[in-house]
Image: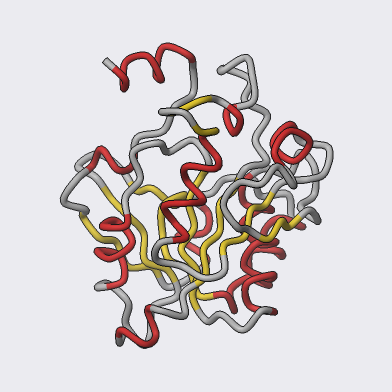
Amino acid sequence: MTQQDAAQVAGIVLAGGRSRRMGTDKAAMDWDGEPLLARVVRIVGERCRPVFVVAPEESAAYRGLFGTGGPEATWVTDEEPGAGPLAGLAAGLAAAGADGATWAFVCATDMPLISTDLIDELLLGVTPSTQAVIARDNQRDHPMAGLYRTDVAPILAELTASGERRMLAVLDAVTTHRVAVTQPDWLTNVNAPEDLHRLHV
């Protein structure tokens, strides 16, 4: 992928989760003086334009953070409630594709250690035949940290319509390239209050 192509990559932050284990909305939790969602959007926005935040209007993220003056982002609210991140990914890619983007970097709102370097490493894995470039650490794939061609949105929508909810199903449905990232900490997500405390220590 050329530098010009890289400059045209959109960003998608999936923020529609219910944060059951956290006990409160993860998107609004403070990380070094800013909401976690705002932090992730800001970092993604350093490499990607525009940035889309996918969260249904009834979600805590949307109710608490929409229009609050944080980093610039376009909200996508047509995600089917309760359908999980796969449906959110399909909705985000459809919105990015309609805006003219060919590729989009996708991540979750609960990744406080995310870095623009992660996006740069994934961009190196793009080939003409690839439909997704997924981060991998030494244990597993991370479909919630990857680059996706926006034209796979209909494929993911069909998966969702069939009842599929697993993000890993994406990797079997599209041509996927895996990139072993140099800093696995970038992929850390927080699911419980003790996770936030551990990362801050």
- Picture coordinates of residue 187, whole percent (x, y): 33, 42
Query: What is the total number of numbered labels drawn onto the structure image?
Result: 0
Report the front residue among 90 and 13: 13
Q: Residue at x 37, y 78 (%)?
A: 6
Query: Which residue is at a point 62% across and 14% down the rendered structure image?
Result: 23
Relative vertical location of residue 195 with respect to residue 63 in this rendering, above or below:
above
* Figure check: 111 above or below 180: above
At a point 69% along the width and 53% down the height, the residue shown is 87
Residue at x 66%, y 46% (from the top left corner): 69
157 above or below 131? above
Name the quadrant of the N terminus: bottom left
Classify the position of the C terminus by image quarter. top left
Whole-percent x and y of residue 12? 56, 59
Using residue 201 as the reference point, say whether residue 158 is left or right of it: right
Image quarter for residue 138? top left
Q: Quadrant of residue 90?
A: bottom right
